[in-house]
Image (tube, rainbow, N blue to C red):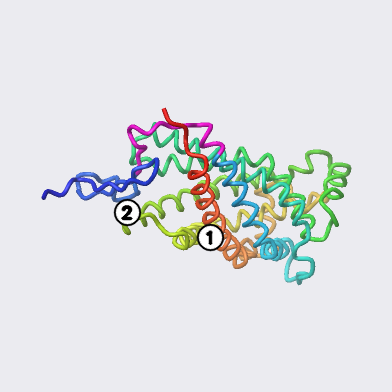
Amino acid sequence: MDVPAFQKISLGALEYKRCNSLMEPPCRFFASVSAAENKPFYFLHAVYEGIIAGGAAGVIAEAVLYPIDTIKTRLQAVHGGGKINLKGLYSGLAGNLAGVLPASAIFVGVYEPIKQKLLKSLPENLCALAQLTAGAIGGAASSLVRVPTEVVKQRMQTGQFASAPDAIRLIVSKEGFKGLYVGYGSFLLRDLPFDAIQFCIYEQMLMGYKLAAKRDPKDAEIAIVGAFAGAITGAMTTPLDVVKTRLMVQGSANQYKGIFDCARTIAKEEGTRALLKGIGPRVLWIGVGGAIFFGVLEKTKQILAQRCPEPKM
């Protein structure tokens, strides 16, 4: 029996293809994916599924790992060799979850339909580009909620405010509405590449695993892939995270004039190693967070697919 040029593994709405021939070089660099030819794409259903699954995954991951995030923030905010306070590690959690829920819902609600649309439009060897683009667009859309949430959260984590409502009121009264978006540029500089890279690494690793195992991954295996994707991306973007944290917690003092001034000042006054402050907690936080987030995300999508199947033609 002849072996076909490609072995196909049907996985729901998508077909993942493994290249068995050297005549198809794109397959050697990225796992390739194409939408099933006769499978219709329902944009609103993808948005709905993404919003529910993304919101659930974001809230659960954030709640579980909030203390590690607090330690990371305090490590990055302290200057020189100052010590950090390990009390009140859940400070600001409730207010943060109120922002994480819509932000995560918006991100995945935008990412999933755009990714699927691009996968149908682009050549299959450019699937990684579809994932990178969808991740960046999803991050940009959710940043309108994520940035104020991050500003309030980090001010509370560093002990500047006692509650989220007080934080919002005082920030607006002292710094104006733009105070809620301080560090917006550094946030985008960190999170747009972070979102794009993390989701692309996750999708590519998951597709590669499915092809190698010739089956759908189990829940624990999805979590492990998510952990690797998160940890790798977290380490790569730590310097950007340090700059973003310093800009967001400086308040009305305006110690730093912008992204590049902040990075230059940190390196000059504290050494370049200061740009890697908190890398340990960050890699741990995002690695474990990736396992939880992607594990819950995929499980929620499975449940939604069973209870709310796509409409038939």
Element carrying mark 1: helix
- Nearer to me, 307 or 39: 307
Q: Which residues are magenta?
A: 33-48
Residue 280 lies, in percent from the top left, at 60, 68
Task: Spot the residue most to the front.
Answer: 307
Element carrying mark 2: helix
Rendered image quadrant of residue 146? top right
Q: Provide the residue designation for mark 2.
A: 211
Residue 119 lies, in percent from the top left, at 40, 37
Residue positioned 75% across, 62% down in the render:
90
Q: Residues within 10 Å of mark 2 (few under 14, many from 20)?
A: some
Residue 144 lies, in percent from the top left, at 68, 39
Horizontally, residue 290 falls left or right of residue 172, namely left
Residue 68 lies, in percent from the top left, at 67, 65
Quadrant holding the C terminus: top left
Q: What's the amino acid at mark 1? A: Ala
Horizontally, residue 247 falls left or right of residue 53, namely right
Q: What's the amino acid at mark 2? A: Leu
